[in-house]
């Protein structure tokens, strides 16, 4: 009997299915792992934005976590939307008791610019959550929120990574997807633990349907770590998966559609 590696996502629900818990579980399935979830918040969300968000009580988050971890067990964890200081601190405390890789996606703002993290929670992310991370995966807006560093060009990414590493994660993955694109430029990310550096480049795809990119990358990274990859191996595999999902992103509703989590299956089906 084959039992797939088990991966837990601690994140918010996206009713539109493109990001959050829904994107995480689709990614984990696509990469051959068993996804499980701790829901931290419920959002009313579609291709146009977030129309409402309701945070779950800390006791509900704690109960879901203990329920899964104590019975089923986990081989990697990924966190997403943790909207308040109380939830950030609750989750950080739960993660501190684990001995498995943890991917922290410090979600601050949605693709549409909606705030998903209270300003009062930023200190808790810096002091409690980031120290639990095997890998932290901030985008450039989140780097600015957490460190005050504005990354304007590739050369700034090293400084941003150093500032994130100062908060205590073992590795920082600085996602450069929001850098202004020059002609023919690739999408570049920097992975570093402060001593070794890995620059990951992939083609930029001219596709506005990118909803869920950050959630998908962090989940793919956690899935690969659960399968036994090293952090550099897992990051390269996750970047490859996300690049394909971005290229295949599709239109839904009147706004920004999602990346295609099933792009590898769908490509094979098309042939």
Image (cartoon, grey):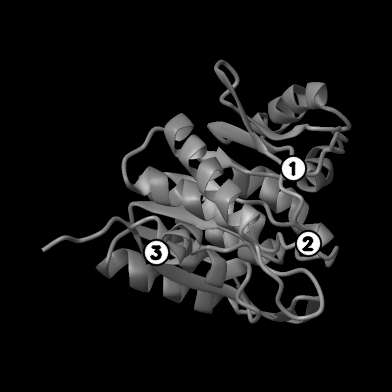
> Which one is earlier in the sequence, the residue at label 3 or at label 2?
3
How much space separates mark 3 and mark 2, taking CA atoms? 23 Å
Label 2 Cα neighbours within 10 Å, binned few <14 / some 14-19 / many ≥20: some
Q: Is residue 100 visible?
A: no
Label 3 Cα neighbours within 10 Å, binned few <14 / some 14-19 / many ≥20: some
Image quadrant assignment for residue 163: top right
Q: Nearer the viewer, residue 83 or 17?
A: 17
- Residue at coordinates 45% horizontally, 49% vertically from top-left? 222
Task: Estimate the x, y position of residue 111 in percent, counting from the top left.
Answer: 78, 62
In this view, 46 is above or below 62: below
Residue 105 appears left or right of 48: left
Quarter occupied by the C terminus = bottom left
Image quadrant assignment for residue 224: top left
> Which one is earlier in the sequence, the residue at label 3 or at label 1?
3
How much space separates mark 3 and mark 1, taking CA atoms? 25 Å
Q: Is residue 192 visible?
A: yes
The tag on residue 111 is 2
Residue 256 appears left or right of 247: right
Task: Estimate the x, y position of residue 127 in percent, counting from the top left.
Answer: 66, 44
Quarter occupied by the N terminus = bottom left
Task: Estimate the x, y position of residue 90 in percent, counting from the top left.
Answer: 56, 62
- Residue at coordinates 81% horizontally, 79% vertically from top-left? 254
Task: Estimate the x, y position of residue 14 in percent, counting from the top left.
Answer: 64, 76
The tag on residue 77 is none
Residue holding disc 1: 177
In this view, 148 is above or below 25: above
The residue most toward the front is 271
Residue holding disc 3: 29
- Determine whether the residue tagged by mark 1 lies in a helix, strand or loop: loop
């Amino acid at each position: 009997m084959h039992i797939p590696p088990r991966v837990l996502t601690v994140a918010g629900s996206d009713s539109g299915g493109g990001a959050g818990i829904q994107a995480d579980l689709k990614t984990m399935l696509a990469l051959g792992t068993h996804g499980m979830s701790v829901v931290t918040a419920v959002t009313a969300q579609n291709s146009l934005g977030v129309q409402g968000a309701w945070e779950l009580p800390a006791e509900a988050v704690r109960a879901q976590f203990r329920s899964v971890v104590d019975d089923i067990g986990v081989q990697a964890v990924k966190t997403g939307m943790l909207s308040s200081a109380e939830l950030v601190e609750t989750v950080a405390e739960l993660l501190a008791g684990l001995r498995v890789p943890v991917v922290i996606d410090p979600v601050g703002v949605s693709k549409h610019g909606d705030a998903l993290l209270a300003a009062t929670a930023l200190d808790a992310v810096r002091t409690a959550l980031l120290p639990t991370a095997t890998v932290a995966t901030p985008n450039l807006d989140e780097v600015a929120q957490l460190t005050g560093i504005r990354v304007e060009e590739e050369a700034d990414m090293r400084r941003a990574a150093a500032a994130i590493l100062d908060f205590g994660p073992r590795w920082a993955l600085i996602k450069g997807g929001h850098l202004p694109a020059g002609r023919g430029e690739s999408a570049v990310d920097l992975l570093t633990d402060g001593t070794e550096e890995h620059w990951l480049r992939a083609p930029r795809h001219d596709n506005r349907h990118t909803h869920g990119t950050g959630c998908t990358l962090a989940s793919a990274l956690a899935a690969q770590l659960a399968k036994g990859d090293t952090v550099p191996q897992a990051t390269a595999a996750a970047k490859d998966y996300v690049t394909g999902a971005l290229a295949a992103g599709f239109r839904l509703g009147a706004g920004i559609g999602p990346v295609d989590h099933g792009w590898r299956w769908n490509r094979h089906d098309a042939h």
